[in-house]
Structures are given as structure tokens and as C-alpha cells.
Amino acid sequence: MSSGYPLDRRPVKLLIVDDSNIVRRRIERSQQFDDLQVVGTAANGFEALELARRTDPDLVTMDLTMPQMDGIECITQLVKLKPAVRILVISALADKATAVEAMERGANGFLNKPFSDRQLNEAIAELMY
Amino acid sequence: MLREEELKTFVDGTTRYFEVAAQQPATIGSPYLLEGEAAMHDYTGMINVSGKREGVVYFTAPRAMLTVLLMKMQESDFSHESMRDLVGEVANTISGNARRDFGHDFVISVPSVFSGEKPQIPQPPGARAFVIPIHWRSHSAKLVVSLT
């Protein structure tokens, strides 16, 4: 998918956070933006913060239910570490209160699992383009 | 105690999972009350539920079904680890979606996954367990919902 942005625009750096390998690969495979560059994948909040320090992502897709450090705690710390980062929560938790809490902590968008390729790309486009 | 009408949340969640993730709807059989222990398939993903309700939700499926499901998801890794990952993710997704109806206090754990060994299924006092049969392509699996 073409972003329609100027050719000299630098790539958008994407960090994918989910405790499922299948979901991480699915997001990586399904995103259709020419200028989106996956800079890392993490299986929990601790790994995500470490990778965020090293890779300085522009966009993070964030699962919520994860071992060791969950997504809500990770969002809280991530926005302190990288205030400009855009965070798209991708979670099975489908209640409104969870979405509101994630947004209050600093997330910018929310996509429920299961999701289609189209829903994923629309959610990314809404945040980044 | 889980009421039969509340099972619709899990039936709908299962239907949605196969429609969206596998792009091919599953046929959901009539749920029935489990008496004794459910027969387990090759892989089982289990979610512990706490808060407003207590108990477990688990998805158990044969390897052949999971292989086709992974193929439909464009996956190329059909390893044991991928099978374990998938049953955990299915159980997590259906349980997480149930919060749409059960609310924020329906607290779910990260998945526990069993394969090859007989899982220890916690059974809180007062819980009723229902089996939701899932038929997809030529395969059959089960979602078991055991909640107070």
C-alpha cells in the first residue's frame, strides 16, 4: 500500500509487541505500507521497553495480556521513555473500560483481536498517515 | 453460576474467531453440560478466569485441524511450538472477547498450554462446565467453558 507521502520521507519504524509468535508474524506479514520498517518484535513489556530504547520506534503495536509485564504497564512506561511514539493496542480484551484505560495511559488507537488484514492496515493508517 | 444464555457470548466469540482469523466460518454444535472430564485433543489452550467469575475456558483441538488453520492464516511454521502458540491464542482471543459482555471484572490470565500430558483442570465449587462443539472443514474441536 502506498502511503502517498513524499519519497524522501524516512521510514516509519515499527515495533511489534505480542506474546504470540503467530500474531507477531501475522502483523509483520499483513502490514502493507511501503515505508513501514519492522525494527523489532517483543514477547512482553520488558522486552518491548528494551527494544524501544535501542530502536527508537515511531509506532508500536501493543498486546495487553502478556506475561512478566502486561501491555498497560508497558504503555505507561513507554510514553515516559518515548513521548512521541504512537501506540496501537491490538488485544482480545473487548470491553470499553480496557480501551479507555489504555488510551488514558497513552495509547493512540485500539484494535480488537481477531482482526482482518484490512482492519489492521486501516488502524495503522489512521495513526501514521 | 454460568447460565445457558451466557454461553452465547462464547459461541459468538468462537464463530467470530474462525470467520476472521481463518476466513472460513465454523459450524458450532449445540452446547451441552459436561459430566465428568472432557476428552482432550492433541493441543489444549487454557485461560484461568478470576474476578467477577471464576473458572476456566479452554480450547482443545487436534493437530490436523491446527495445521489447516495455520495454513489459512498464511503461516509456514507448523512446528509443535506453533501449535501450542495457536491454541493459546484462540483461547485468549475468545476469552478476551467475552469481556464485551461480562465486563472489565472478567479477568483472564495468560494462556496455559497442554500437549501430550493430561491437563489439570481447576474446577471451582459451584462452577458448571459446558462444552461447545466446533466443526470446521472436516475437523472437530471443543471450547469448554467452566465458570461460576
Image (tube, rainbow, N blue to C red):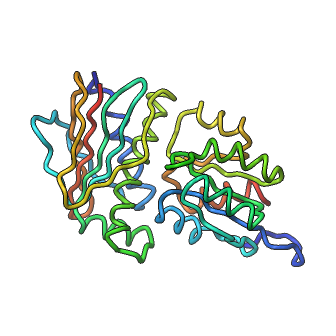
User: In the image shown, does B8 or A105 lie closer to the viewer?
Assistant: A105
Asked whether B63 or A5 is in front, the reply is B63
- The residue depicted at 39 percent of the width and 49 percent of the height is B111
Left or right: A105, with B141 as reference point: right
Q: Quadrant of the N terminus of chain A?
A: bottom right
- The image shows residue A13, relative to residue B33, as above or below, that is below
The quadrant where residue A120 appears: bottom right
Name the residue: 89% across, 77% down. Answer: A8
Residue B136 vertical position relative to residue B7 in the rendered view, above or below: below
Q: How many marks?
A: 0
| Residue B97 location (% of width, % of height) | 46, 40
Figure quadrant of the C terminus of chain A: bottom right
Image coordinates of residue A34 in percent, x first then y, are 72, 75
> Residue A103 location, x and y as percent?
70, 39
Splitting the image into 4 quarters, where does residue A2 fall? bottom right
Residue visible at 71% across and 73% down in the picture: A37
